[in-house]
Amino acid sequence: MSVLALQHVDVERLSLLEEVLAQKGIPARYLALHKGERLPRSVEDMEDAKAIVVLGGPMGVYEAEKYPWLADEIWFLGEAIRAGVPVYGLCLGAQLMAAALDARVYPGEGKKEIGWFPVDLTPEARGDPLLGDEEASFPVFQWHGDTFDIPEGAVHLASSARYPNQAFRWGARAYAFQFHLETGMADITTWLEAFEGDMNSPRSDADPEAIMRDAPGHLEALNRRAARWFERWLAFAGLA
């Protein structure tokens, strides 16, 4: 049994989540969509993969003309989620899951969220099997300017001051998170270089020096939470 990781850019990987998988002896199989690797033709063709992690990326869900594989990915995710395949989405991955469930994905109206921001769990999250015992508010790492509507039938799990729709659950095993918990210092350093243009956007008020300065104070708790949530999700998926 393995986990299929849908990748959209070289610099965004499973990071800490790959360490969790390795500790449990669960292989991760990357599918580099941005390099032309093809999705399974159907959920039945996933071979030994029993769950899907949808990674982040700098593109928008609505840019299918520029990134033709996005349309196929959205279709595939819709089939997988509705078939009950466990799916775990991060940043762009969450937006793709929303689109796959027929919700709107679009650029946010205000400034982007790039850096360290608090998110607040919704009242509905208190009864969620993954998040129910977490504190009401905690800092996360963000890097996005797009947002999504909560899909019909989904449970809204988290919000922030700039972007109210930060996380949702659809069914029992599909979770979408706009924010990052899995990143390490190496990821953040790499992203600051790789996505420098995003930092310089008129919609950005991010301070790269502040991001790096504040990282050591956040990463340990951030990564503990990432491991805790991911391990629980793997249990829901029947993989741990």
Image: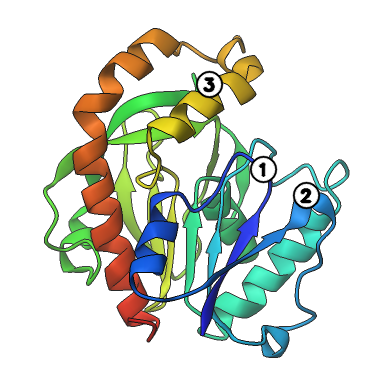
Q: Where does label 2 land, which residue?
A: 34
Residue 228 lies in quadrant: bottom left
User: Mark 3: which secondary structure?
Assistant: helix
Q: In the picture shown, does residue 163 fall above or below 116? A: below
Q: Are marks 3 and 1 in contact (CB under 8 Å)?
A: no
Q: Residue at x 33, y 64 (%)?
A: 230
Q: Which amino acid does the dot numbered 3 rest on?
A: Leu
Q: Where does label 3 land, which residue?
A: 192
Q: Which amino acid does the dot numbered 1 rest on?
A: Asp
Q: In the picture shown, does residue 146 fall above or below 240? A: above
Q: Nearer the viewer, residue 57 or 127?
A: 57
In the rendering, at what x and y percent does residue 131 appear? 22, 61
* Mark number displayed over residue 46: none
Q: Is residue 128 left or right of residue 162?
A: left
In the rendering, at what x and y percent does residue 49 appear? 58, 81
Q: Residue at x 41, y 42 (%)?
A: 179
Q: Which amino acid does the dot numbered 2 rest on?
A: His
- Looking at the image, is mark 3 or mark 1 earlier in the sequence? 1
In the rendering, at what x and y percent does residue 127 appear? 17, 68
Q: Residue at x 22, y 60 (%)?
A: 125
Q: Label 1 vs label 2: CA separation?
A: 8 Å
Q: Where does label 1 land, which residue?
A: 10
